[in-house]
Each structure stands twice: as structure tokens, then as C-alpha cells.
Image (spheres, rainbow, N blue to C red):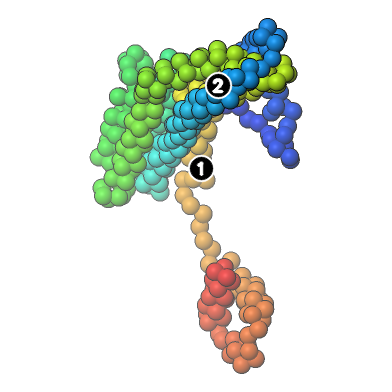
């Protein structure tokens, strides 16, 4: 790999345990919404207990009316926060889906280009290797540039395949600009030049599939920028913050008025404030899937896996497919026939059909074997 950067926070990998409860999951603080929610819930609890002691108990004249009004207010606030959590989770999962689709399109583009080369022409072998090496490095740079663009200034660079061999003047010029506006054009021109020079050995309509896969990956990237550049509308976030702060300030007072003892007053204040702020912070954590916080997408691992797949495609065993040896297959006919007979017998085939099967020649027996295996698979 070429450029690298310092260690960054990766997406949290956790284990729920057999019963859905695990100590490492419950008591983990990094990436959790619990510590921040406690900053609001603990003071609210202490204030509720203090006010209960100060006022000397519940106020029976206002208990029912205040309790019902506060229940309605909490319901509306809970609905708004859950709505934000639903939108945030949709954004997060859409980003995950689009990232994998983008990777798949670009990887398939590279595999298509490799499979369409003149792989059996010894005279063209140097040109084929040069074309594959260039495409492999440009694809790695393209994927890294896409992730860095989506992450903004939070990620400076990620590992790429060694760019040695590419024109350093072009690379230096590219580094100072938006690479996502440059690298797709370089890749397309490389593919066009390979076709013009005879490195690609397929018809143009078939070769166009590789261009379509490259462009579809760019389309997925453009859809990802929608998630990166457009956050939740300002009025939604602002009003939720107003309601949350007002709720955290008023809940201790309401709890001290409607509860019968200081323990229940503190419990009501803590549970109400803590639960709502937890949900709000969960939405905030996953609202932006790109970045370097603990709940962002593991883009560093994604880049490394993409590089590994590119490097694997250059392996000598992917230059050609495995050849089928007909003689070896003929030796398997008897084995397939035995399996077929056992399958047919398990289905209670009649004696007449069994006798007919015994009279078949080798080609017919193979056909019967194939049909029986297909019937078994469908059943």
C-alpha cells in the first residue's frame, strides 16, 4: 500500500451473548450514548429529590392535571425524537448499501476489463500486464478518493496500492484537486486506449459493459454525497433541542409535585430524562455515517478489503479459467449412476422402471442421472 494515515476509530464490533446480555456490551462507554445522557439525567434526579424535600411531598390539588399535561408533552417529544432516530437509521443503512454497491460496481468493472484482455497472446502479454497494473492502481485511488470526499476533512488519506509506475507529474497535479472529478476520466481514457491498441479482445458492445459498471459506481458515489452534504433540516433539530432542554428543566419540578415520596420522584425524573436523551444521542451518533467517531462506517477496513480484492485479481490463477478434462468426467459416470439409483429407489420406483433403467446405455444413464439430481434438488 502507498499512502497511509494514523489509526482512527473503527466501527464497534460487539457480541450480544447467548441471552442477549454481555458485560462488554453493557459497560462499554466508548461510542455509547449513555455517558452523555447521564449528564442530563443525574442532575435532574438530584433536583427532583431536593424539590420534594423542600416542598414536603406531592400536591394533591395539582397532581392529576399536571400529570396528564406532562404525559401529553412527553408523548409529543418522544414522537419527535423517535422520528429523528428513524430518519437517522434510514440514512445510515442507505449509506451502507450504497457503499457496498459502489464497491461492487467498480470491482466488477476491473474484473470485466481483466477478462476481456488478450490473455493468450504472448506478444500482447506485456501490454496486458501494463493495462491491468494501471487499472488496478487507478481503481484503488478512485475508491480512496471517494471515501475521503465523503468523510470531508475528518480523514486525510487511506491506504492505496503502490502508485509507483504512474506518471508522478500527473499524480502531483491530481493530489491538489478533487480527485473524484479526475480519476474516472483517467480510467475511461485508459480503457479506450487499451481497446484502440488491441489489448482488449472483445467487441465494442460487450466492452461497453465495463464502462457502464464504472459509471454506475460513480452514480452510487453521487447518491452518497447526498447523505454527506445534506443533514436534517435545521427547524427539526432546533425544535427538538428546545423541547429536550425544556423537558430536562421541568421534569424534576413535575416529579416532585406528583410523586408520593422522594424515591419515586427521583426515579421518575431519571428514567424520563435519561431515556429521551439516550434516544436523541443515538440518532445523533448514526446520523452522519462518515467520519472518525466510533459509530461511523469502517471505511478504513473497506479500503483495505478493496485493495486486497484488486491485488487478488492479478493472481496467475485468474489469468485463465480452470480447464475441464472430459476423461476425468467419464470416470465419474458410474458414481453418478449409483447415486441416481439410490435416489430413485428412495422414491419407490416400480420394478418395471428399474428394469428399464438397467437396460439404458451409458449416455442415457447419464441423462437419467442428471434428471434425477435436478429432481432431488427441486424437491
Q: Residue furthest bottom?
A: 352
Tell me: 343 left or right of 312.
right
Residue at x 50%, y 18% (from the top left corner): 244
Depicted 112 relative to depicted 361: above or below: above
Task: Name the residue located 55 percent from the left edge and 12 percent from the top edge.
Answer: 249
Give the distance between the C-alpha atoms of the residues marked 1 and 2, in whole angstroms. Answer: 76 Å
Q: Position of residue 133 (x, y in %)?
A: 42, 32
Q: Which residue is labeled 2 in the image?
A: 66
Residue 337 percent coordinates (x, y): 62, 76
Pointer 1 residue: 316
In this orientation, does residue 103 appear?
no
Q: In the picture provided, is 161 more to the left or to the right than 17?
A: left
Q: Is residue 102 left or right of residue 188?
A: right
Lower sequence index among marks 1 and 2: 2
**Quadrant in the picture for residue 172:** top left
The quadrant in which the C terminus is found is bottom right
Q: Which residue is at the front of the view, 44 or 213?
A: 44
Amino acid at each position: 500500500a502507498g499512502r497511509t494515515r494514523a489509526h482512527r476509530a473503527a466501527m464497534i464490533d460487539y457480541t450480544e451473548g447467548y441471552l442477549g446480555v454481555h458485560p462488554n456490551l453493557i459497560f462499554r462507554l466508548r461510542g455509547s450514548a449513555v455517558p452523555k445522557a447521564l449528564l442530563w439525567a443525574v442532575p435532574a434526579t438530584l433536583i427532583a429529590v431536593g424539590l420534594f424535600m423542600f416542598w414536603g411531598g406531592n400536591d394533591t390539588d395539582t397532581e392529576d392535571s399536571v400529570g396528564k399535561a406532562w404525559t401529553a408533552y412527553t408523548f409529543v417529544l418522544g414522537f419527535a425524537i423517535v422520528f429523528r432516530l428513524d430518519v437517522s437509521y434510514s440514512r445510515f443503512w442507505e449509506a451502507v448499501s450504497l457503499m457496498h454497491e459502489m464497491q461492487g460496481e467498480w470491482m466488477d468493472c476491473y474484473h470485466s476489463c481483466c477478462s476481456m484482455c488478450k490473455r493468450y497472446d504472448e506478444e500482447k502479454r506485456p501490454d496486458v500486464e501494463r493495462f491491468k497494473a494501471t487499472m488496478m492502481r487507478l481503481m484503488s485511488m478512485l475508491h480512496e478518493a471517494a471515501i475521503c470526499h465523503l468523510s470531508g476533512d475528518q480523514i486525510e488519506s487511506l491506504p492505496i496500492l503502490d502508485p509507483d509506475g504512474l506518471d508522478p507529474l500527473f499524480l502531483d497535479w491530481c493530489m491538489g484537486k478533487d480527485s473524484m472529478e479526475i480519476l474516472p476520466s483517467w480510467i475511461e481514457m485508459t480503457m479506450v486506449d487499451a481497446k484502440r491498441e488491441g489489448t482488449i479482445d472483445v467487441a465494442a458492445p460487450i466492452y461497453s459493459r465495463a464502462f457502464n459498471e464504472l459509471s454506475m459506481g460513480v452514480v452510487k458515489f453521487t447518491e452518497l454525497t447526498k447523505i454527506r452534504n445534506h443533514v436534517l433540516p435545521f427547524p427539526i433539530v432546533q425544535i427538538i433541542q428546545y423541547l429536550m432542554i425544556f423537558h430536562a428543566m421541568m421534569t424534576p419540578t413535575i416529579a416532585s409535585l406528583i410523586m408520593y415520596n422522594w424515591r419515586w420522584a427521583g426515579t421518575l425524573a431519571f428514567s424520563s430524562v435519561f431515556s429521551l436523551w439516550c434516544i436523541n444521542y443515538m440518532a445523533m451518533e448514526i446520523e452522519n455515517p462518515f467520519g472518525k467517531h466510533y459509530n461511523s462506517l469502517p471505511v478504513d477496513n473497506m479500503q483495505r478489503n478493496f485493495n486486497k480484492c484488486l491485488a487478488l485479481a492479478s493472481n496467475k490463477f485468474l489469468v485463465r479459467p480452470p480447464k475441464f478434462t472430459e476423461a476425468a468426467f467419464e470416470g465419474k459416470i458410474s458414481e453418478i449412476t449409483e447415486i441416481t439409483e439410490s435416489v430413485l429407489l428412495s422414491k419407490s420406483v416400480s420394478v418395471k422402471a428399474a428394469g428399464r433403467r438397467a437396460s439404458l446405455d451409458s449416455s442415457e444413464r447419464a441423462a437419467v442421472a442428471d434428471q434425477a439430481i435436478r429432481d432431488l434438488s427441486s424437491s
